[in-house]
Amino acid sequence: MTLELRGITKRFGALVANDHIDLTVRAGEIHCLLGENGAGKSTLMNVLYGLYTADEGEVLIDGVVQRFSGPGDAMAAGIGMVHQHFMLIPVFTVAENVMLGHEETLSGGRLDLPAARAKVREIATRFGFHVDPDAVVEDLPVGVQQRVEIIKALSRDARVIVFDEPTAVLTPQETDELMAIMRQLKDSGAAIVFITHKLREVREVADRITVVRRGAVVGEAEPGASDAELAALMVGRPVELTVRKDAPVRRDTGLQVQDLVVTDERGTVVVDGASFAVDGGEVLVIAGVQGNGQTELAEALVGLQRARSGSIRLDGRELVGLSVRRILEAGVGFVPEDRNVDGLVGDFSVAENLVLNRLDGPPFARRGMLQLGTRDEFARTKVDEFDIRTQGIETPVGRLSGGNQQKVVLARELSRDLRLFVAAQPTRGVDVGSIEFIHKRIVATRDAGVPVVVLSTELDEAVALGDRILVMYRGRVVGIVPSTTPRDVLGLMMAGIAPERTGAA
Amino acid sequence: MSHAAPQDPRGGQAAATDATPGAPGDVVADAEVPLTDTDVVHSRHGGTGPADPRWSEAFTRIVSGGWAVSLGAVLLAVLGGSIMIAVTDEAVRTASGYFFSRPSDTLGAVGSAVGNSYAALFRGAVWDYRADDVATAIRPLTSSLTFATPLIAAGLGVALAFRAGLFNIGGQGQILVAAAAAGWVGFGADLPWPLHMLLAMAVGIAAGALWAGIAGLLKATTGAHEVIVTIMLNYVAFYLLSWLLATPGLLQAPGSANPKTPPTAQSALMPDLLGPRYNLHLGFVFALLAVAGVWWLLHRSTLGFTFRAVGENPSAARVAGVDVGRTTVSAMLVAGGLLGLAGTSQVLGQVTTGFGSDIDAGIGFDAITVALLGRSSPLGVLAASILFGAFKAGGSAMQASQGVPIEIVLVVQSLIVLFIAAPPLVRAVFRLPQPGRRRPPRSRSRRDRKAVTA
């Protein structure tokens, strides 16, 4: 079957998320939709899946115009979607999840679970997965949960399967397995739409590549295209993909973490005895698959998570037990993982956000009064220095693009007198152009002699930015290795397998 | 609103027969009990259970609607009121009996009923164009401003709490406690004016602040939701005051069996601003000062900045080193102080002949409406309060001259809240642009993602 999108246009107020997009997906091919965050890929797929109604344009299946008023219609037409964030009910079993929404009943209204189990087994066998139909979903590893999503789509006879950023939550090995599954699906005659912004994956599986930028299709690329070519298409100009940096000039140890244990509110240990040191003038990247304790570790460094035991010393001074305020005063700069939640107040202006954590004394506050003149002058300087693209310093920060929002956070943190800089996922949801800039600033901070800790789930970034890489798995430090370590070793470490020669430093 | 019994300025409480204790939480408490974003902080960084982000979204949306929505809501509510007037009018009902033979009679009756009623409302609230001299003609306006006085202060208290992400339903309790404290100083102490008045005010404001502070402290230390706590504190305040009023030797007037205090001493009164012909008292000036003060606090002080930051995004505030719990307590203290000001202006300016346990006169709840209508901004609250003062003053005139039930005004007030709570409805009716969703759902915060349903 052939899926065709013709002239799809979707507007949100003044923003045109999709601007007359044409896309054709044929059976037996993997069609990559490549674009930066916010380019309109997901909007397009939500139109396809019936979650949004397009303002203009139409969806055709085998030349017949379709009208979807909801995901139910899309599923009935043979479109399945594997969402980035799984749409599974964690406390249900695999079989229950698969049958949810089109339950079949036996006499007396009993659920026909045996049929659902048989279906799960049948599909799993067909594609060579191993999925226990009676396993409870929340007990399964992320990669397996994703397979449950795939089975769910296939159980409804999906002929077109959309994968929306499927690799964000996977280890490199799991990613490879997913690629294999996608190829199998393709060979069985399904049409695959693969949404991603990771160039490596695109080149690996794509049969055809469509690049989307600012809501419009900007071109098609051959699978053989180089990273640089694809990136240039995505961004609209040549991009430097590697981080240019000199060898680190190490100074004295700045940050010393010893046997740090952090628990979450339920008492589960999320950071399990982490020990490491970061010297002034070096970048330590904390890598690992999302959700293995990196976030909590970073938050513990800033006092946002209480350390159950262990110590965090900065230039010899104990930080455990201090309030966030005191830790900030001690010279710790922090770029939180989710800037919209933890880093910025969306309705506040750029200027207000630039001084968000600096209002307990001069120069931005005196005797409890805001010094608006000083603040605005500071904001104007920083907007220039960090190339923050905004209409003005009074613009609410929520209206800026992801990259410019991140620059606001970065400008705020780097403008203080730092003794330690912690950046969690500093380039997530940031356009490629801004990524370059952010990386440069991080390296500049390192070169100024500040110890830098960067959290990253992207292996490319970890390797490019880090001087050393610390890999976490299930709250434990698997190992600390130089950034020259081969990728497959790093991949194994992210799955919890420690490299042979290196111990936990 | 529930309790907005028509109150004769300076003349003591009108028909306070409705002394049902069901007063606390009658109206708005049932309408909207959204969780604020602060819960989210607790849930994520060690605290209570998970919070539903939809509630905080709804909360933000309702609390920060646009001016156009406020205006539209008022217009729609007035339209709804017109229908009520028409339906309840005797002449309209008679004429509608033969509607199909002479429809013009019905329409004419509707026109005159509605027209006369709103004309009476205007006469009673703004300008009595039938009066002989200007001094009499402006009397309704001063009366509206008098009614608006406690509402301004109370509305500011609720609005300030809104800005800090707190839903203060406890206006009634805070006003009652403040009135009791200020009244006690007002008739009990023996001091010269203005010392006596200022002391009574200070004690009343402090009492209101502390009463609200309890809710803030409980929220900050245990995560108890301020909506629940403040509602319950309303009951506590109501019954506590009832007991004080019924117990000889406490607040009850000596030699009286009524649950009523002695009159406020002359030296503690807020004097009339425009002479004895008008009711407008010094409390109005204090209310205006409070408007300026709250504006300054919110927009020029670091404390107000932290209030707003915590209100808009407690997670980011916490990461920026703000002590969210302490901010919650401070915000409730200031909010309670403003409601305390409303309470003191009631006993020192409005009801000076001794008061009962209905001294709050529904202001605590009207304050929520006023804060919503005024978009939680100080000037908006001022405007909305004057509008509501006018409704109160004009409502009685409407009843007296047109026989329109006073409840119509309460219906209009309630409809205003209803429409404000449903901005998309107002926008659709007036064809205002619906705010575009800037971000598609997928790119929402990671908390939202966790709460994904199948």
Image (cartoon, coloured by chain):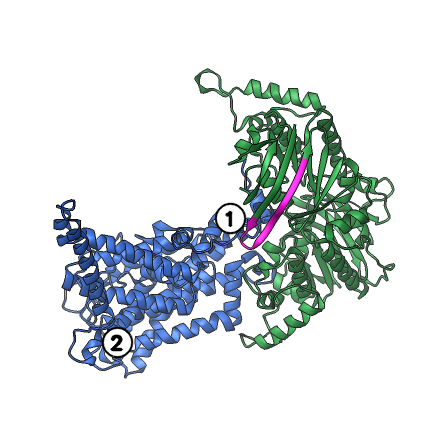
Chain colours: A green, B blue
- Tag of residue B386: none
Q: Say if the magenta span includes residue A19.
A: yes
Residue at (57, 33) in percent of width and height: A65
Q: Amino acid at mark 2?
A: Leu
Residue A193, quarter of the rendered image: top right
- Indicate left or right for B66 with A216 as reference: left
Residue A236: within the magenta? no
Secondary element at image label 1: helix
Who is closer to the viewer here, A391 or A92?
Answer: A391
Subunit of mark 2? B
**Which residue is under mark 2?**
B280
Q: Main secondary structure of the magenta part?
A: strand
Distance from label 2 to label 1 (Cα)? Answer: 45 Å
Q: Position of residue B315 (x, y in %)?
A: 57, 56
Asked which quadrant contains residue A225, the reply is top right
Q: Which residues, given as a range, are shown in magenta?
A: A11-24
Q: Tell me if mark 1 has few (under 14), some (14-19) or many (20+) residues whose alpha carbon lies within 10 angstroms of its own.
A: some
